[in-house]
Each structure stands twice: as structure tokens, then as C-alpha cells.
């Protein structure tokens, strides 16, 4: 109704202008005035339904229907799901809550790395509580113009109440992803106070949620960096529940792989348990990508079912990137083959059975690579385990040195990794320096790093030199076949022993 009225007024206005122009009046000032009013309205984002400023028109923003994701679609987050559901049950127990005078739960903060299922959790929460659901991302509220972010926050909340009313629901969930973009500590953004205004508005909206409202709104927010958030956001009465959503462990990874394998034909040789073992550090999003990529591999190969090989290939693609057409010269290939054989031999020395694949095919940034898998997921390392890791890192360059008398630039990444491990060792108080402070002087730190790495390099040199014949055979085999599986590699290693 309001819109029709506006259109009629606009039409009349245009007709008058045309009439005046035909009568010979100078209409330039009217046009200029109209343009100025339009600009002001656009900048303030008021009245005009511009795509830019209206959060409700944004393609990410509205999903007012109830999402069809349920908690069973989320794998490997058992503890987080339990905690989350417990908190959500507060919404169901509405009457009891009112009778006991408990203040309503207004906000739940999901904290964890990207791709672990935080958005899925928020959607499942809407489904579980039969609530309308609206999603937005923190970055959508950050604008250069004062007041726009705050206005978007208001629009978002207005929309959730309106949508719940329309859908006849008593509850609504507002999901704000990357809340750290908008909820960082106030006063931190010196350039403008816009962030602060936006955050203040969010706090006002959260504070405005009352127990006796007809429609109850729950704000679910997600972040990877809870430490960056303004303390006002996480104080009791606002986001007073914090749920940690971690990277999945092995059983969790298996669960997620099984969820995403649904509806995909798997060949008999597929061993998802093995893939779960080899994907330590992968998020749910990575695992979804592995299953999807494996299906694409099968399609490309004209196969009807996904094989274990498809899954392995997909895993490497997700881990390291697409295979490249980059063709190293024969001389470079020989260097790469020795480099990777060195890594693999040391990996096998420190942990038998740890090599799952070696290849000299370029992929992503790597000219060649070995893929290792731990026996078990590991979260804590002893000193000797860290030193072993340094040995594996340095084995590529050392192998080159033994065979060719010099190293190449191919070891830069390995060196960086070795330095990081050495730092970890030093700051955990495991080096000869004993317990050290964070602000350890730069020169003492770098001296200690060099000492640790040199000592390990010496051990690697000793080992590889004494098994140079094996190193040569493995590198040659790699040059002939481009890729060796862990089993093939161990067979050769055993044969030549
Ligand atoms: P986040 O919000 O934590 O960044 P999302 O919930 O957006 O992550 O996850 C992205 C995608 O990754 C999902 O759509 C889903 O396909 C997959 N995924 C992530 N975590 C899980 C999980 N725990 N179980 C099943 N799938 C998952």
C-alpha cells in the first residue's frame, strides 16, 4: 500500500516536471535538488530500499524459513552439540523459566576454527527450536559511513521479529558469523567510531530481549578469535554461553566422512577409517571437500563408483592444491627425487609405517612431497618427538648435499618449518636454555635455533650417509614411477636393506 502511494506521488511529480519543461520553465534547479535529496537518502540508507544498505535485501542475510539441517547432520562435535542443545533447551522450558524468574538465554557464542560446522550448528538450532532463522556476517555491518552499521543491526532484529510473526513462530534465531569483525574491543579502531556505534547497537538489541516478549530471539554468533571480542559482549546476560567447536578427532572425522558419503556410491576397496586416520588437522569443510573431489575424480576417470585411490587423490588435492602442468627439467626432477627420498627415509626412521605416499609431481606450491600420517591424533609432543620432526624437515636438503655436494632453494619451506619447531621447543622450556621468557633477546633465540637445527642435521647426515645406497635406489625408483605408495616405499626399503 505504502509502495503504491509512493509510486503515484513519484509519477505525479514527474508529470508536473515534464509539463513545466514543455511550458518553457527552467527545470534545472528542480533536477539538481532532486539529485541532492536522492544522494543524501542513499548515503544514510533510509527510506530507499537500496541493495547496499538494506541488510534484509542482502543475499546472505535472509533465510527466514526454518533450515532443514538437524544435529544428526553434524559429525564429530558431540561435546559441542551436547552443550549447545542443553542451552537451547532453555528456550523450550519457557514457562518454567518464567515461573522461576530465570533471565532468558539471549546469546550463544560458538568459538572455533573455520569450517568446523558453526553455521550448521546455528541452523540445526533453529530447526531444533522451531525458530525462524536469519544469518548475517560481521563484515556486512562494517561500513565507512557513520550510522549505517548500527542501522543494519536494527534492521536485522526488526526482520527476525517480523518474520517470526509472519510465520506464526514464538522464537527466532539471529546468526552472526565472524562476530569479531564487528564486536572487536571498542576504541581499538582508531580510524572511525563507526565500529563502536555498530557494536553499541548490537548490545542494545541484545539487552532489549525480554523474558515476557511474545517472540523470543536468540542470538548465535560465531568467531575464531574470542580473545578479540569486547568484554561487554561476553558479559553475563549477553553471550553468556560459550561453546567451543574444535577440529574433529579421528572418530569425528570418520563420522563426518560417513555423513558426506551418503548418496555417493563407494567401491568395495574404500576404507574411510584409513582416510580419517590420514586427515589429522582437517576441518569438516575439508572433509566434505575430500568426498566431493573424490566423486569428481571418479567421474573424470569414467568410473561408476568412488575408489580408495580417488579418495587419496582428493585428499592430496585438498591438502596441497591442484596438480600443476609445471614441468621441472630432468636435472630438477633428480634433485626433487633425492630430496623427497631423504624426507621419507627419515620419516620412516623416526616412526615406522608413517609414510603414506611420496611423489615428485608438482602440486600447489610443492614440487614434490611426502604425505605422512600419524598412528594416532597427537596434541602433545615430547622433546625427542620435536627433534625427530626437525630431522624429517632437514632430511631433504641433507640428502641433496650428500649426493650433489650442495643444496638447492627447494628446502626453504622445510627450513621455515624446522625453525618454527625449534621455537616451539625453546618456548616450551625444552631447550638447553631452560625456561625462557617471551621476550628472549633475538640474538640468543636465533643462536639457540641454529644450534638445535645443526645438531639434528648432523644426525640426519650420519644416517643418510650410512644408507646412501638405499637413498639412491629409492630416488631412482621415484624417478621411474613418479609416485610411490607408503607400502611400495617400505617394500623397496626392506628389499634393499
Ligand atoms: P563454519 O561456520 O564453522 O565456518 P560451516 O558450518 O559453514 O563452518 O561448514 C561448512 C561446510 O563444511 C558445511 O556446509 C558442511 O558441508 C561441512 N562441515 C563442516 N563441519 C561439519 C561437521 N561437523 N559435520 C558435517 N559437515 C561439516
Image (cartoon, rainbow, N blue to C red):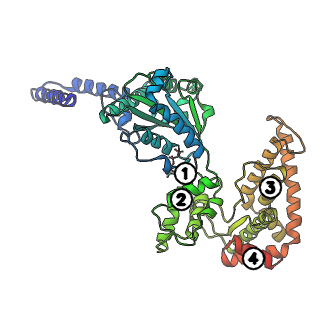
Q: Is residue 329 above or below residue 197?
A: below
Q: Is mark 3 within 8 Å of ligand 1?
A: no
Q: Which residue is mark 3?
A: 390
Residue 409 visible in the displayed image: no
As helix, strand or loop, the secondary structure at mark 4 comes to helix
Q: Return the disc, 2 or 1, that comes first in the chain's sequence.
A: 1
Residue matched to label 4: 491
The picture places residue 469, in percent across and down from the top left corner, at: 84, 76
Q: CA distance from mark 3 to mark 1?
A: 34 Å
- In which quadrant of the rendered view does residue 399 lie? bottom right
The 10 Å Cα crowd at callout 3, few under 14, some 14 to 19, many 20 or more, is: many
Residue plotted at (54% across, 38% down): 84
Q: For the residues carrying marks 3 and 1, which lies nearer the camera in this image?
A: 1
Q: Residues within 10 Å of mark 2 (few under 14, many from 20)?
A: some
Q: Which residue is mark 2?
A: 258
**Mark positioned earlier in the residue sequence (3 or 4):** 3
> Residue 192 at x, y = what percent?
52, 25
Amino acid at each position: 500500500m505504502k509502495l503504491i502511494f509512493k509510486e503515484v506521488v513519484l509519477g505525479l511529480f514527474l508529470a508536473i516536471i515534464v509539463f513545466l519543461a514543455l511550458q518553457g520553465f527552467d527545470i534545472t534547479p528542480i533536477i539538481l535538488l532532486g539529485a541532492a535529496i536522492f544522494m543524501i537518502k542513499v548515503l544514510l540508507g533510509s527510506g530507499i530500499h537500496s541493495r547496499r544498505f538494506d541488510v534484509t535485501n542482502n543475499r546472505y542475510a535472509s533465510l527466514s524459513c526454518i533450515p532443514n539441517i538437524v544435529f544428526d547432520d553434524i559429525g564429530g562435535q558431540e561435546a559441542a552439540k551436547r552443550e549447545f542443545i542443553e542451552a537451547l533447551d532453555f528456550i523450550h522450558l519457557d514457562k518454567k523459566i518464567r515461573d522461576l524468574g530465570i533471565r532468558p538465554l539471549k546469546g550463544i557464542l560458538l568459538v572455533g576454527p573455520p569450517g568446523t560446522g558453526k553455521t550448521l550448528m546455528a541452523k540445526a538450532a533453529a530447526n531444533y527450536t522451531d525458530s525462524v532463522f536469519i544469518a548475517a556476517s560481521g563484515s556486512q555491518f562494517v561500513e565507512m559511513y557513520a550510522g549505517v552499521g548500527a542501522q543494519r543491526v536494527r534492521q536485522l532484529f526488526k526482520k527476525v521479529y517480523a518474520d517470526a510473526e509472519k510465520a506464526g513462530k514464538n522464537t527466532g534465531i539471529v546468526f552472526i558469523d565472524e562476530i569479531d569483525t564487528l564486536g572487536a574491543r571498542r576504541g581499538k579502531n582508531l580510524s572511525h567510531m563507526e565500529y563502536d556505534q555498530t557494536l553499541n547497537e548490537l548490545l542494545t538489541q541484545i539487552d532489549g530481549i525480554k523474558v515476557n516478549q511474545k517472540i523470543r530471539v536468540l542470538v548465535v554468533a560465531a568467531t575464531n578469535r574470542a580473545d578479540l571480542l569486547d568484554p561487554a559482549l561476553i558479559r553475563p546476560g549477553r553471550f553468556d554461553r560459550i561453546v567451543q567447536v574444535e577440529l574433529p578427532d579421528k572418530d569425528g572425522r570418520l563420522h563426518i566422512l560417513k555423513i558426506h558419503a551418503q548418496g555417493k556410491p563407494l567401491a568395495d576397496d574404500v576404507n574411510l577409517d584409513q582416510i580419517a586416520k590420514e586427515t589429522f588437522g582437517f576441518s569438516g569443510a575439508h572433509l566434505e571437500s575430500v568426498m566431493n573431489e573424490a566423486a569428481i575424480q571418479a567421474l573424470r576417470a569414467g568410473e561408476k563408483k568412488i575408489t580408495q585411490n580417488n579418495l587419496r587423490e582428493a585428499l592430496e588435492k585438498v591438502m596441497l592444491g591442484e596438480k600443476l602442468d609445471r614441468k621441472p627439467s630432468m636435472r630438477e626432477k633428480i634433485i626433487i627425487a633425492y630430496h623427497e627420498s631423504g624426507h621419507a627415509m627419515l620419516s620412516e626412521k623416526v616412526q615406522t609405517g608413517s609414510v603414506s605416499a611420496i611423489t615428485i609431481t608438482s602440486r600447489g606450491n610443492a614440487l614434490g612431497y611426502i604425505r605422512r600420517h600419524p598412528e594416532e591424533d597427537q596434541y602433545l609432543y615430547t622433546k625427542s618427538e620435536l627433534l625427530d620432526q626437525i630431522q624429517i624437515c632437514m632430511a631433504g636438503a641433507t640428502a641433496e648435499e650428500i649426493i650433489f655436494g650442495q643444496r638447492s632453494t627447494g628446502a626453504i619451506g622445510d627450513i621455515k618449518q624446522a625453525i618454527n619447531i625449534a621455537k616451539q621447543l625453546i618456548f616450551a622450556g625444552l631447550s638447553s636454555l631452560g625456561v625462557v621468557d617471551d621476550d628472549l633477546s633475538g640474538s640468543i633465540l636465533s643462536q639457540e635455533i641454529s644450534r638445535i637445527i645443526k645438531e639434528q642435521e648432523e644426525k640426519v647426515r650420519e644416517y643418510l650417509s650410512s644408507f646412501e645406497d638405499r637413498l639412491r635406489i629409492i630416488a631412482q625408483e621415484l624417478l621411474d614411477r613418479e609416485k610411490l605408495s607408503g607400502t611400495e616405499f617400505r617394500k623397496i626399503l626392506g628389499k634393499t636393506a
